[in-house]
Image (cartoon, rainbow, N blue to C red):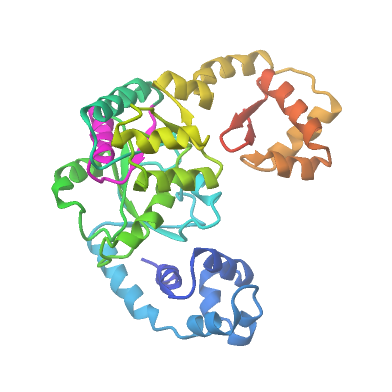
């Protein structure tokens, strides 16, 4: 592997530099290698860096550990994915605190057309498991990538159901790829390597400590179009994932349960607080996400190939061409139009099959 990987791993290991500051350093210095070759005085002037962080960068003791990790990566056929790489999950790039470096083992495309995260309680009931299995079976025609955390309960149920329906599925770890946690799920993890894989932003020898799980959850939430909660207690880890997904402007869905059932209290709570949409089937999710219209939209596009656009519509289309997907605020800025005007034009273009709306108030050309 190239020397650049050593710099990428080293940057991710600097104790006082998190993912947000790491990206800022790369942006200001021009490359990850340049970060470590920059003078301390210049580093101190970068917003948010200061003397302490600049000193941490200059103190290059992390390189030894980075070199050890490269040996582990090469020995175990692990794929490192940097945030600027084409293979990096595109949905995750929209999240400010996304990891600068991921470690992946398996065979999967992070950027499939549909990516769904499914989370829930570790103490799943037969009701929860049956919902999970039925949901994934009904969504299988969309060929989605199923993401979860390989934990007991709903997580492992989602992975198994995905494999049963010949769907690729990814388990996200809160520790390094040198272990499987929980160990009881080793056999399912090995099957996932053949049809999906295992993903983490932690280096080897990292223990699955409780404080690492919220960090893991941001990947589960960030790399998916939507997060679905199937059974959760109040204060459960899946609710943390749901909160993170909401903060990323991603759609969150939850299946309701009986009011006095502890394993459904969390789902009922986030539905009541409007933090999740109540769903009862795969059809509900397809409808809300607009996925049931995909075939109709393609036919509509064929009909609208020679559609004549009005001048203002052309301005919006031109702004959308500049990026793969754009949020409505950026469109207003680019077109110098009001929010209400842009919203009206987008709706007209969507009906014409020219524009497609995405989760999180994002839009792209069809």
Q: Residue at x 80, y 34 (%)?
A: 315
* Residue that lies at the very extreme toward the front in this rendered image: 260
| Quadrant location, the N terminus | bottom left
Could you say where residue 80 lies in the image, as x and y percent from the top left? Answer: 37, 58
| Front in this rendered view, residue 166 or 49 | 49
Q: In this view of the protein, can residue 113 be seen by the observer?
A: no
Look at the picture and state if 66 lies above or below 353.
below
Q: Which residues are magenta?
A: 143-165
Across and down, in percent, residue 306 comes to 73, 17
Q: Residue at x 17, y 46 (%)?
A: 185
The quarter of the picture where the C terminus appears is top right
Where residue 128 sits, quadrant-wise, is: top left
Q: Is residue 136 visible?
A: yes
Residue 304 image offset from top left, x and y in percent: 69, 16
Q: In the displayed structure, would residue 157 be above or below residue 9? A: above
Q: Is residue 339 left or right of residue 17?
A: right
- Residue 156 inside the magenta-drawn segment: yes
């Amino acid at each position: 592997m190239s020397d650049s990987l050593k710099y990428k791993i080293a940057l991710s290991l600097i104790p006082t530099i998190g993912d947000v500051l790491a990206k800022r350093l790369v942006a200001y210095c021009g490359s990850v290698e340049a970060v470590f070759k920059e003078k301390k005085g210049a580093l101190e002037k970068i917003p948010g860096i200061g003397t302490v962080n600049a000193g941490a960068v200059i103190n290059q003791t992390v390189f030894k550990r980075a070199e050890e990790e490269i040996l582990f990566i090469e020995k175990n056929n692990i794929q490192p994915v940097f945030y600027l790489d084409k293979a990096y999950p595109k949905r995750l790039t929209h999240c400010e605190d996304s990891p600068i470096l991921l470690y992946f083992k398996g065979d999967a495309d992070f950027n499939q057309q549909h990516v769904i995260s499914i989370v829930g309680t570790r103490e799943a009931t037969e009701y929860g498991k049956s919902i999970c299995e039925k949901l994934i079976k009904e969504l299988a025609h969309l060929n989605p990538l199923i993401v979860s955390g390989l934990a007991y309960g709903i997580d492992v149920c989602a992975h198994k159901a995905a494999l049963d329906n010949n769907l690729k599925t990814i388990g996200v770890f809160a520790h390094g790829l040198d272990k499987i946690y929980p160990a009881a799920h080793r056999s399912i993890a090995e099957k996932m390597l053949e049809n999906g894989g295992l993903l983490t932003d932690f280096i080897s020898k990292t223990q699955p400590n409780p404080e690492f799980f919220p960090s893991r959850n941001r990947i589960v939430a960030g790399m998916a179009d939507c997060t679905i909660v199937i059974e959760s207690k109040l204060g459960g880890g899946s609710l943390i994932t749901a909160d993170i997904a909401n903060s990323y402007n991603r759609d969150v869905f939850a299946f309701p349960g009986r009011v006095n059932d502890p394993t459904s209290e969390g789902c009922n709570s986030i539905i009541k607080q409007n933090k999740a949409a109540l769903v009862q089937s795969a059809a509900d999710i397809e409808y809300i996400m607009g996925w049931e219209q995909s075939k109709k939209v393609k036919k509509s596009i064929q009909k609208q190939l020679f559609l004549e656009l009005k001048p203002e519509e052309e301005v919006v289309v031109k702004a959308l061409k500049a990026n793969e997907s754009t949020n409505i605020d950026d469109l207003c800025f680019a077109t110098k139009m009001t929010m209400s005007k842009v919203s009206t034009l987008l709706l007209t273009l969507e009906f014409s099959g020219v524009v497609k709306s995405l989760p999180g108030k994002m839009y792209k050309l069809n």
